[in-house]
Amino acid sequence: MRLDLNNKTILITGVAGFIGSNLAIRLIHSSDNIKLIGIDNMNDYYDIKLKESRLKELGDFKNFTFIKGSISDKLLIKKIFADFIPDIVVNLAAQAGVRYSITNPDVYIDSNLIGFFNILEACRHSYDDGKKGVEHLVYASSSSVYGSNKKIPYSTNDRVDNPVSLYAATKKSNELTAHAYSKLYGIPSTGLRFFTVYGPAGRPDMAYFGFTNKMVKGEKIQIFNYGNLYRDFTYIDDIVSGIIKVIQKTPEFTDDGVPYHVYNIGNNKPVSLMYFVETLENCLLEEGIISVRPEKELLPMQPGDVYQTYADVDELIKDFGFKPETSIEEGLRRFAKWYRGYYMQDSQIQGENNEIKST
C-alpha cells in the first residue's frame, strides 16, 4: 500500500545520529505538512558537538519536536506514542559499532534489544481500542548480519545464522522480533540492512573519519588484514533516498500472511580498503587538508571483522525502481569539503577547540 506522507506524524528515533538527522532534514524540506518527532539520548559514544550541530539544522523548523531520551526508557516511549500518535515510525536508534560491542556489550542490550522491544510494544498498543495505529514501522538492520558468509553478493534470501559480533546478533534479533510482532499484531514492518554508510558529518568512529583525523595530525594509519578487505560503501544521500522510498510503501504480505520485508541498501559495488584509503588521500590533498600522504601500518584481521560486504539490491530495484549510485570518488570528495569547512580555518586545524577524535 502506498502512503502519502503529507499530514503524517513521523517518529524518528536516533534523530541526532548520522542517518537520522539526514533523514529528518530531507523530510522536513519535502513538505510543510509533515510533523516530525525526534528522540535521541545524545550519548557520548562520539563527540556530542557533532550531534548537536546536526540537530541545530532542524531547530528552526516549527514542525519538528525534539525529545532527549532513550528508547530503552519504556515509560518515555509510551508517553511519546500517547502524546504524538505517530503514523510512521523509523527506528534508527541503536548502539553502533562492531568493535565497541566486544568491550561494551551492556549498551547494545539496552538500546538494540530492550529499546527496540519498547518500540515494537508501543506500535502494538497503538492499535488498542480500534485505533488506526502505526501504518508502517521501518527499522535499521545492518549488513553485519551476514557475518562470514562466503556467498556474494549478499542476498536477503541468504541464511544469516552465524553472526561474528554481538552488534550483528542484536540486529538479527531485531529482524526476528519484528517478524514475530508483524505476524502476531499485524504491524507492517520493513527492515533495512545498511552497508557501510559514509559521508559529510558522519560518525567519527568509522574508518574513513578516523583515517582523516590521523592524517591531519600526521599520524600513522592502521590498515587491517593488510588492506585486503572489501566494503560496499554507501553514500548517505543514497541511504536517505532509499529510506524515504521504503517509508512510502508498506510491505506486501508474505506467503504466511505477514506484512513484513527486509531489503539491502548498498552501493552494489564493493571496493578494496586500500583503494578507498588512496581515494580519501587524494580528496584530502585536493582540499589542502593534508600536504603529504600518511605512513601506513598493515595489520592482521581484527576480531569481529569480515573480509567483504557486497549488497544484492535486485529487490530494491524491483520494488522501488531505486539503487544507490554515488561513486566513492564523489562521496569522499564531498566528505573532504565538509571536513575542511567544519574543522579547519585558514588551512590550519583549529586544535583542541574542535575536539577531533581519532579512532
Image (tube, rainbow, N blue to C red):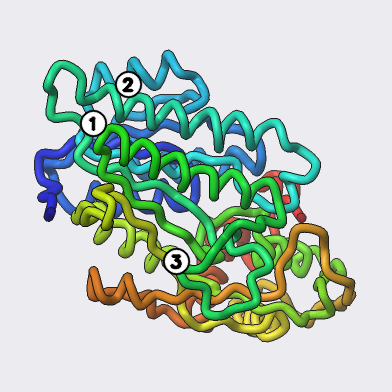
* Residue 24 in view, yes or no: no
* Image height of 96 relative to 341, above or below: above
Nearer to the camera, 15 or 152 = 152
Contact, mark 1 vs mark 2 (Cβ under 8 Å): yes
Q: Residue 209: where, in percent of width, then height? A: 65, 62
Residue mark closest to the camera, 3 vs 1? 3
User: For the residue carrying disc 1, how many other residues have a C-alpha within 10 Å: few (<14), some (14-19), or many (20+)?
Assistant: many
Q: Residue 230: where, in percent of width, then height? A: 66, 79
Nearer to the camera, 347 or 114 = 114
- SS assignment at label 3: loop
Image quadrant occupied by the C terminus: bottom right
Q: Residue 235: where, in percent of width, then height? A: 46, 69
The residue depicted at 76 percent of the width and 55 percent of the height is 358
The residue depicted at 75 percent of the width and 66 percent of the height is 216
Question: Which kind of residue does numbered mark 3 sit on?
Answer: Thr
**What residue sits right under mark 2 in the picture?**
80
The residue depicted at 11 percent of the width and 41 percent of the height is 33
Place residue 346 in its image quadrant: bottom right
**What residue sits right under mark 1 in the picture?**
86
- SS assignment at label 1: loop
Question: Is 273 situated left or right of 326 in this image?
Answer: right
Question: Which kind of residue does numbered mark 2 sit on?
Answer: Ile
First reached walking from the N terminus: tag 1 or tag 2 = 2
**What residue sits right under mark 3 in the picture?**
156
* Image height of 135 relative to 290, above or below: above
Question: Which kind of residue does numbered mark 1 sit on?
Answer: Pro
Question: Is 299 situated left or right of 54 in this image?
Answer: right
State the separation of the CA atoms marked 3 and 1.
Answer: 28 Å
Contact, mark 3 vs mark 1 (Cβ under 8 Å): no
Q: Residue 357: where, in percent of width, then height? A: 73, 50
Q: Residue furthest front?
A: 256
User: For the residue carrying disc 2, how many other residues have a C-alpha within 10 Å: few (<14), some (14-19), or many (20+)?
Assistant: some
